[in-house]
Image: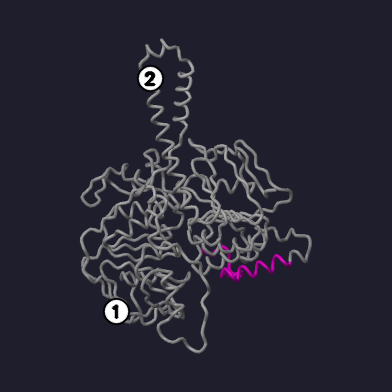
Amino acid sequence: MPLLSLRDAELAYGLHPLLDRAQFAIDRGERVGLIGRNGTGKSSLLKVIAGRAALDDGELVVGDGLRIVLVEQEPELPEAATLRDSLSERGGLHRIADERARWSVEARLNEYLHRLSVGGERDPGSASGGERKRAALALALALDPDLLLLDEPTNHLDIDGILALEELLLKVSAAIVITHDRAFLDRVATRIVELDRGLLRSYPGNFATYESRKADQLAAEEIANRKFDKFWAQEEAWIRKGIEARRTRNEGRVRRLHELREQRAARRERLGNVKVTLDAGERSGKLVAELDSITKRFGDRVIVQNLSLRVQRGDRWGLIGPNGAGKSTLIKLILGVIQPDSGTVRLGSNVQVAYFDQMREQLDPEKSLVQTISPGSDWIEIGNERKHVMTYLADFLFPPQRASSPVRSLSGGERNRLLLARLFARPANVLIMDEPTNDLDIESLELLEETLQSYDGTLLLVSHDRTFIDNVVTQALVAEGGGKWQEYVGGYSDWLMQRKSPAEPAPAKKTTPRAAPKPSKPGKLSYKETRELA
């Protein structure tokens, strides 16, 4: 007996249905990874399952007494003296009549706050978005629901936090998780469900298994569509003869043609991919930046201690470290935006920088998409190509009817795409990307990977997406505590191997690093690439 099931579910916002007679069920012990393109309705589906939104038609069947907890992308916390009190109010802990049961939940809450590095005594009003998200995750786990619903839980977590969450999710009763983190899905998911054109398609296994099966499904769909279109064209040619059709009085064939037309009109094509072109502009000098014995403190906190580093043209650096380690500060030091307390920073010649801000502070919420991309002009020049701003926005999946919409009307994933569009609209030979993968769907994320792999300029990347780091960077700069930063060749998995097997003899008191999931191997073909090679 499933914990919960959807039968012939229908839900629509706007022109296209988000759910179109969709079917779904989840059993105890399953951990479902829910994926799909931005805007397809994944978050809306979780709200329906949580009882916060209603279906337009169809049936949601929930088991008797089933306890469901949802953690949204941006969870809201009630006002209170402390973050712990706010969570108690959000979770209704004061309504638990049994004192021993309430004490048990509070004890688990304290444990999970600690494991997710959240201070329960701080003022919730001053908590960052990341702290609020981690606090809501801690509460959800403490409530020990029968079904846990998580909407992009890794967005504000550092790698250690993601690893801790993976371990915790392996022990839950059942879960549905929306995420773009492929390494997370490989470790946690027992089944992948894709929301695609209103239908929920199920693929047993983790994300790696899904990719291979999805390639087969898309190939079969393409063959079936080609056969259908060929047969439909033949029938249209027959009816155009007119006289012969009337003479033969083949009314059945005419009715079949009408049915074919209706089927073709109802067929929903897959959403296209973002079209990204990166213009590296004029070449920078061979040396992009040189740091010589720099140190930077904020009060008693050491961000960088005696660091020397050379960034050369064509390097692709990944900065790895926990939240608060100072990755964004280090980037500003490299660019000369802020000055070190001691040591020197030298910027190379002819350096043109484009900066992707993880907080999206570069976007004015009141400006339209057109004003954001190309203020005062209808045209954009990328390399030797001149594009109309409407065409350029369409490359990033913004249709013409949305070009005049204000930025504030966009979802998180759409804002991310808009910021990428703005970033790539100008030539730059040094690209700074601070958490560019947040809220992107997996197909757009993989396309961004491919674009960055072929970029001729210099890249400095801050990301907690382990697969993305592995597939993009060639060198890693890792925060190792106390302001110490260490260089490693390769990406995240290369750093793990080098950290586990240091070249120098280990000290007598050896520290064993936390085990981590093996990320997807660089160079693995996605199902999109499989289609292109077919």
Of 112 and 367, nearer the camera is: 112
Residue at image coords 39%, 62%: 522
Q: Callout 1, which amino acid? A: Thr
Question: In the rendering, at what x and y percent does residue 435 appear?
Answer: 42, 61
Q: Which one is nearer the viewer's eye here, 76 or 388?
A: 388
Position in image of residue 21 (x %, y %)? 57, 37
User: Which residue sits furthest front?
Assistant: 248
Q: Is residue 392 above or below residue 497?
A: above
| Residue 70 appears left or right of 423 | right
Left or right position of 457 against 522: left
Please name whichever residue, 218 or 288, is drawn nearer the observer in this view of the structure. 218
Q: Label 1's element?
A: strand
Q: Is residue 471 magenta?
A: no
Residue at the spot 29% in from the left edge and 72% down from the top edge: 311
Q: Is residue 166 left or right of residue 384?
A: right
Residue 54 is situated, as x and y percent measured from the top left of the image, at 62, 41
**Vertical position of residue 348 compared to residue 248: above or below:** below
Q: Which residue is mark 1?
A: 344
Amino acid identity at mark 2:
Trp
Q: Main secondary structure of the magenta part?
A: helix
* Vertical order, 386 against 513 (above or below): above
Q: Quadrant of residue 312?
A: bottom left
Residue picked out by circle 2: 238
Q: Residue at x 53, y 48 (%)?
A: 42
Q: Which residues are magenta?
A: 103-128
